[in-house]
Image (cartoon, rainbow, N blue to C red):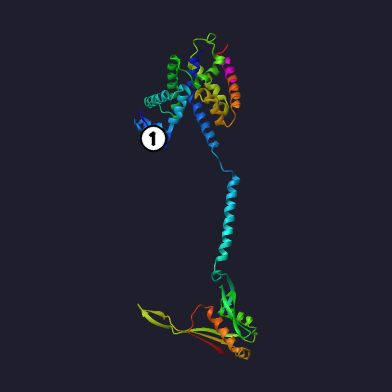
Amino acid sequence: MELQTNRMSTMSDEQIVELYWQRDEQAIKETDIKYKKFLLSVAMNIVHDICDSEECLNDTYIGTWNAIPPAKPLALQAFLGSIMRRTAIDRFRANKRQKRIASEFTVSLSELEEFIADDSDMSAEIETKELAKTISNFVRSLPDRQMFIFVSRYYIADPISTISKELGCSVSTVKREIEAIKIGLKKQLESEGYIV
Amino acid sequence: MTQEKIIDAITDLDSDILERYFAVKADLAEKKKPKKNAWVKWASVAAACMVLVVMATFAMQYIPTEYSLNYSYVYANGRETYIADKNVWIYYVDKGEIERERVKLPCTAENVFITWKHLNSVGDEVELIECKIVSNGNESTSEFEGQGVANYEPGDYFVLNITVTKNLQFYEDYELLIDSLEKSMSEYSNIDFDEINVLFN
């Protein structure tokens, strides 16, 4: 798929979703115009390779084309980001099997492994969905700033330096806040029996 | 808990959290845009006003005085009215020569005459009785579609008749005074008179 344009999209998310529902291929072009940069940054943070990122981007467009309809996302950017993250993680896992794993994602992941890496204490029946719900509830309870840091760091896998620039503060400040968030998440997981 | 589960759990974060994340991200980006401080805006307005004042001051200096008109409340032609102030030359006799002075005044024959008297030190016993412009213009009436219509054909010969009290004749340099009066009374009206008569009553 070759999409090259410098035009700024003037379409709203609703209009783009409507194009998907009409099975109009212009939907993919408009998505590319509006969200290509964001999607590539998500992929790059995870797979850390421009060729892999572009392949992930194409897979994301195909995945979106197949998902809408029946899906009718209210927040297209979040929807696309979610598909891109899954696609990029699949690529990350494939690369991991081939020992090609040097990315911001592995760094951010290792931060969480500090307190939830021990698999032996955990029930094998715990469903990923339940864990996702617990984490979602925890993140939802955070103030905007901490929520932003958590999602930037562990969902988008942004480097700490990027987060500090966006927040207009120092790297060490963001690191301190990440530590505080991790402690909070750990308590939450402990209270729900994920960590013994 | 495997690393895989953590990855998948975070990937499955609820969409409302992601929506909130993107809203916060947009807010942060908006806040990072450079904003003009309020004082810069007000300083710009003040500077613009200063420039206007300076320009207006300069412009006033270069407007010809002939056109810098004011309006005065005068009693003219038997009724109160507003007359435009105008800079006019008033002629006067000084040491046997006719000189002139620029004077700004409400431009009526009475005012020009009073000013002329003042510059020539002519007393109140000399009065302007009448200042009349006579031309060879022709006024007639005709009928158009059953109605009377007034017609005026402009003339091409203009006479200025200035009637003053006869005691002006007793002043020294009487003839020069008459000349200066003719010049003063004729020039302010901007009419090129073919004949100017000073009459005594």
Residue under the point 59% across and 43% down: B37
Quarter that holds the N terminus of chain A = top left
Look at the image and say whether residue A67 sits in the magenta stretch: no
Vertical arrangement, residue B104 with respect to residue A99, above or below: below
Residue under the point 46% across and 29% down: A38
Instruction: Give the chain of mark 1.
Output: A
Vertical arrangement, residue B128 with respect to residue A159, above or below: below
Look at the image and say whether residue A186 sits in the magenta stretch: yes
* Residue A73, percent from left and from top: 43, 28
* Residue A41, percent from left and from top: 46, 27
Q: Is residue A139 visible?
A: yes
Quarter that holds the C terminus of chain A = top right
Q: Give the range drawn in magenta.
A: A184-192
Vertical arrangement, residue B190 with respect to residue A125, above or below: below
Q: In this view, does B30 lie to the left or right of A13?
A: right
Q: Please, which residue is most extreme toward the top here?
A: A120
Q: Mark 1 points at which residue?
A: A5
Residue A66: image quadrant is: top left
